[in-house]
Image (cartoon, rainbow, N blue to C red):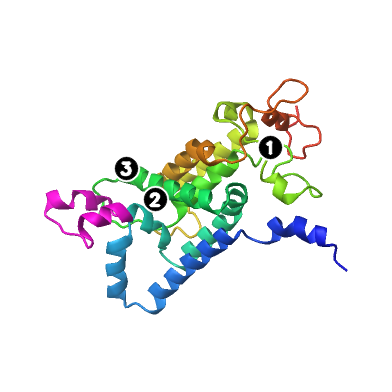
Amino acid sequence: MTDPTLVQRREPVFNLPAVVTALIVVLALIHLVRTTLLWPRQDDALLLLFSFIPARYEAASLGIEFPGGGLAELWTPITYGFLHGDLIHLGVNSVWLAAFGSALAWRFGAGRFLLFSLLATMGGAAAHYLAHSHDFVPMVGASGAISGHMAGVSRFMFQSRGPLAGVGRDPRARFQVPAVPLSGLLADRRVLAFLAVWFGINLLAGFGTLALPGEEAVVAWEAHVGGFLVGLLTFDLFDPARAPPPARSPSGRAEWMDGLDDPDDPNRRSG
């Protein structure tokens, strides 16, 4: 007979948070409707209405009228995140959403997670606009939000007793460890390595030297960077696990620093 305590401890590992599951289902249903119920011309009209088009904000001065008018300028920095180019694009983003979004949702709870995702999505749109303010090409995809998730998770995933800790520890507790403060990012080479690899991949993709799965069209890497920076900088505003003043170990160091050289941490660096 299965030990009920083991089932409870394994729950966060084998099951996605309800809010993440719901988001993936919504993304899939939207794509299903577009590809099975709409004619190509109808889908084009939907894209013009809900995708993010930087030139929309200069339409009046250019004598061009986009569907939705001025109101669409308010909703498209959000709604573009619910649309995807094709099934591969949707599948890849769903996998990343399940991986990084779940860790963040376990930590934040549904409400904070959704608001955090909303801001990261808008941050992605803002960065894309700054780089392509005259562009008529629609931008779609949840990558801005997912990039924000990755940034948020990077603040606590390498910590001692964190999400990457060995088996045998309470899975829920692993998502509540103290986060690395922004001022401490430079002190942890694992976080720095993650940031360097992430930005390096996106820069290479942006210059066309690296193809990303699910990104057959031009990669809107600026939106990735925008979402990531928003996630990195606003994480503390949403983090319910932060506890000022920071807890300190017997050595007098802040608790988050114990993950840098904890001998029991399987992810610690060695000299």
Q: Is residue 207 visible?
A: no
**Do labels 1 and 3 touch, CB within 8 Å?**
no
| Residue 220 - label | 2
- Magenta span includes 151: no
Distance between mark 3 and mark 2 Cα atoms: 10 Å
Work out whether residue 111 or residue 79 is closer to the camera in this orientation and state it. 111
Is residue 239 visible in the rendered image? The answer is yes
Residue 74 to residue 91: above or below? above
Q: Where is residue 123 shown, x and y percent of the image?
A: 40, 44
Residues at discs 3 and 2 in contact (Cβ within 8 Å): no
C-alpha gap between disc 1 and disc 3:
35 Å
User: Residue 11 sits in which quadrant?
Assistant: bottom right
Q: Which residue appears at 81% of the width and 32% of the height?
A: 263
Rendered location of residue 110, percent (x, y): 55, 54
Disc sitting over residue 56 in the figure: none
Is 63 included in the stretch rendered in magenta? yes
Dominant SS type (magenta): helix
> What residue appears at the point 55 percent right and 42 percent down from the top-left corner?
152
How far apart are the two marked residues, 2 and 1, measured between alpha carbons? 31 Å
Q: Secondary structure at mark 3?
A: helix
Which amino acid type is shown beneath numbered disc 2?
Ala
Amino acid marked by disc 3: Ala
Q: Work out which residue is located at the far left of the displayed protein and give it.
A: 63
Viewport quadrant of the N terminus: bottom right
Q: Secondary structure at mark 1?
A: loop
Q: Residue beneath label 1, please?
A: 159
Instruction: Please give the residue where the numbered disc 3 appears in the rendered image.
Output: 131
Query: Considering only vertical position in the picture, is 256 above or below 202?
Result: above
Instruction: Give the magenta part as a residue range.
Output: 53-75
Q: Earlier in the sequence, mark 2 or mark 1?
A: 1
Q: Which residue is at a point 55% across and 59% down the rendered structure image?
A: 19
